[in-house]
Amino acid sequence: MISLRPQPHAAVKSNKHHSLPLSPASRLSHFSPPHLSRFSPPRTNLRLVIRAIDAAQPFDYEAHLSQRFNKSTKLKIAIVGFGNFGQFLARTMVKQGHTVLAHSRSDYSEKAAELDVSFFQCADDLCEEHPDVILLCTSIISTESVLRSLPLQRLKRNTLFVDVLSVKEFPKSLFVQILPQDFDILCTHPMFGPESGKESWKDLSFVYDKVRIGKDESRALRCERFLDIFKNEGCRMVGMSCAEHDRHAAESQFITHTMGRVLEKLSLDSTPINTKGYETLLNLVENTASDSFDLYYGLFMYNKNAMEQLERLDLAFESLKTELFGHLHDVLRKQLFGKAEEGLERPVERPLLPELPQNGRALISRAENLNKEN
Ligand SMILES: NC(=O)c1ccc[n+]([C@@H]2O[C@H](COP(=O)([O-])OP(=O)(O)OC[C@H]3O[C@@H](n4cnc5c(N)ncnc54)[C@H](OP(=O)(O)O)[C@@H]3O)[C@@H](O)[C@H]2O)c1
């Protein structure tokens, strides 16, 4: 409590750090008009001095409440794998007031300090901080070795494990195999990256699968708070099983990355007469080229649907070429043989390649195709 007590002037001098200048109201009371003087306190040379500083009760109370509320909604998140994507996510988590720790194979101490993240070179030290969440942001292909190397025994018994890998069935089965039963598991995939999400995450998709979340209310809340990070940024939240994610991602993401990488090999240049379509292709190259080859390789190796999509792409390209050359062939025949062929019965046209197999149907090998045609 602040008690403002009249003090002799001498005391003020010895206590100058806590002396307050007189407010206009108190100055008035010192210089009150003569007709009020009988109601005024006796005129001693007094000043007001703070004796105790536990006063601002209503303000303090609110501050405490809001601190307590913040504490209850904020998480301590340990990012394992502090590369391109880990740093990208950390920026937003710090902005939202979460405490972010990081650990990686390489030393990112300086980068972490810039982002207000505490960097731990040793995984033991990181785990002894007892984070609420361990967020795996390692490359797909290194995930298993990284996960197996973590000193899980140093973590709180019911830590929440989250991954952001671009494939989902693989980390899910790793987590279920390796993590103790007490740990919660949330598999996620933000469908955007440092390029596509650099301005904002609004309306960008965020896929998640609550693989194993304890029944305890506090554990359910912790999971929701983690999801809130993305919800609060305006992401489109999509709850979906890991298997379903991988089927869709092979068709969309793997094809996108493959086309981006094929186009990159063509070293396309901007021209003075770019069409909108061409601009889209240039953007696609820019979006995919900044991702590591490890990431692309992981999309191929660790999604069982990717191989089929690669085959389909190959067949589609062959079929297109055949169609083009078929037309060219017709034109050339007309030019070469012209009238000589008039009146002759035209051979029945048949497709040179069979229809492309649908997703999920076994691929017919090229050798089989050739056999069928002969
Ligand atoms: N980039 C995106 O747009 C995007 C979007 C959604 C999800 N993701 C997912 O996020 C994760 C990280 O992606 P990224 O873009 O940062 O690139 P990445 O090349 O897939 O992964 C780089 C991270 O993996 C770590 N790493 C690589 N090899 C390692 C090894 N042998 N041992 C230990 N750590 C190793 C790196 O650690 P050091 O740097 O310390 O070497 C770095 O933290 C991936 O699983 C990816 O699928 C990425």
Image: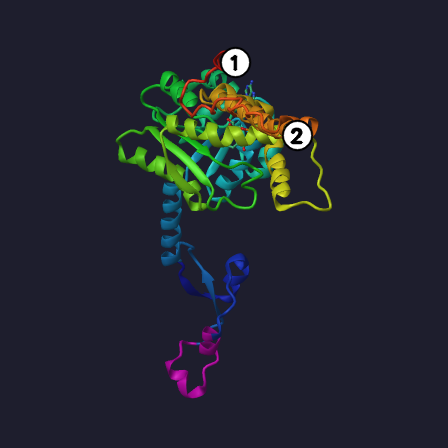
Q: Evaluate whether residue 171 shows in this view.
A: yes
The residue at the point 39 percent across, 16 percent down is 178
Callout 1: few (<14), some (14-19), or many (20+) C-alpha neighbours within 10 Å? few
Residue 333 appears left or right of 102 = right
Q: Which residue is mark 2?
A: 339
Q: Main secondary structure of the magenta part?
A: helix
Q: Which residues are magenta?
A: 25-42
Real-space CA distance between mark 2 and mark 1, rounded to the nearest whole angstrom: 33 Å
In the picture as drawn, the residue positioned furthest to the front comes out as: 343
**Where residue 192 appears, x then y in whole percent?**
51, 37
Q: Which residue is mark 1?
A: 370
Q: Secondary structure at mark 1?
A: helix
**Where residue 139 appears, x then y in whole percent?**
53, 23
Residue 344 appears left or right of 72 = right
The kind of residue tagged 2 is: Lys
**Where residue 298 appears, x then y in whole percent?**
52, 22
Q: Secondary structure at mark 2?
A: helix
Residue 350 appears left or right of 183 = right
Q: Which mark is residue 271?
A: none
Quarter residue 114 falls in:
top right
The kind of residue tagged 1 is: Leu
Callout 2: few (<14), some (14-19), or many (20+) C-alpha neighbours within 10 Å? few
Q: Nearer the viewer, residue 159 or 172?
A: 172
Q: Quadrant of the N terminus?
A: bottom left
